[in-house]
Image: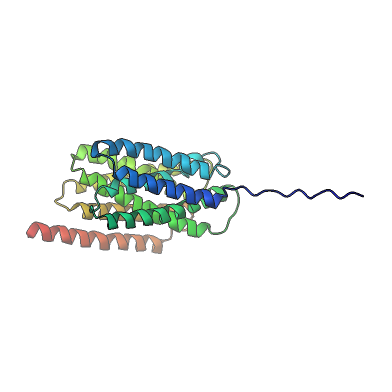
Amino acid sequence: MPTWPRRVEKRPILTKRRKFVLVSLLLSLGLVVIQRLPIEERYGAIIGFAVASYFLTAWSLLSELRGSAWLTNMILPTFYPVSVALFYFLLPAESVTRWIVTLLFAISMYGLLLTANIFAVASIRTIQLLRAARAVGFLLTVLSAAFLYHVIFSLRVSVGIVTPLVFLATFPLVLQGVWSYSLTGSIKRETGYATVGAIIITEIATALSFWLIDIPMASVMLSMAMYVILGIFQHDVEERLFPRTIQEYVGFAAIVFLVVTGAVFMRWMG
């Protein structure tokens, strides 16, 4: 009997990991290009950069995205590049510093895409490395918030502008951070958490606007608030919010608050 040749399945040229590498490199290139544009064109370019971040990430995760993940799982991969691009303006002009930041961004963006992929898969079925992905996502969420808060206070605008900007920066990040622990299709409960968290941090930002406080100190205070609030919310979603956990977060917040307040008073007295 004749033997038919076995059909060999061809592996796709662009595997998921290769897509992640490509997206990371493209966004890093976009970061460099934006900084070389005239100042009046940069903010418009950042809007395009945000759109590109969303669609490139969606393309790399296309086979895994379902339902609300098209929104929730795409928040951090969009906000993180934008926060770095905005913070990039405030860095020293030395090319070495900027190239180091670009390299770190490319590496961290690749890690973020791997994290988003784990979240997308875990929302459908059980997967290992979910705990590690949540830790990476939490770190990059707080870092993105710190960059955005620093940029907002660097604008040196009135409190009437600072307040809505802080809320708009905080709400999506808290929403994504809480969703990463529930991974549900409905985000009604997550929206409630995000609203409460954004209001609290916005109130802190409003109070800081009336202080004679350095911009880095203000961003540290607000990112500390993000760390504490988001951490408590995530433990609550996991149903692991014990009194000792609350004490640890409150203790950390108290230490940061005392250090920053002491620095502010030293400046006032000086």
In the picture, measured across the screen, residue 118 lies left or right of residue 203, that is: right
Most distant residue in the right direction: 1
Where does residue 132 sit, x and y in percent of width and height? 49, 60
Where does residue 160 sit, x and y in percent of width and height? 21, 37
Q: Is residue 57 above or below residue 264?
A: above
Who's the residue at 60% across and 54% down the image?
A: 126
Q: Nearer the viewer, residue 70 or 100?
A: 100
In the picture, measured across the screen, residue 120 lies left or right of residue 155, that is: right
Q: In the rendered image, which quarter is residue 92 located in?
A: bottom left
Answer whether residue 269 is visible to the viewer in this image.
yes
Q: Nearer the viewer, residue 139 or 239?
A: 139
Where does residue 230 sit, x and y in percent of width and height? 38, 52
Who's the residue at 22% across and 55% down the image?
A: 217
Where does residue 236 sit, x and y in percent of width and height? 44, 53
Q: Quadrant of the C terminus?
A: bottom left
Answer whether residue 197 is visible to the viewer in this image.
no
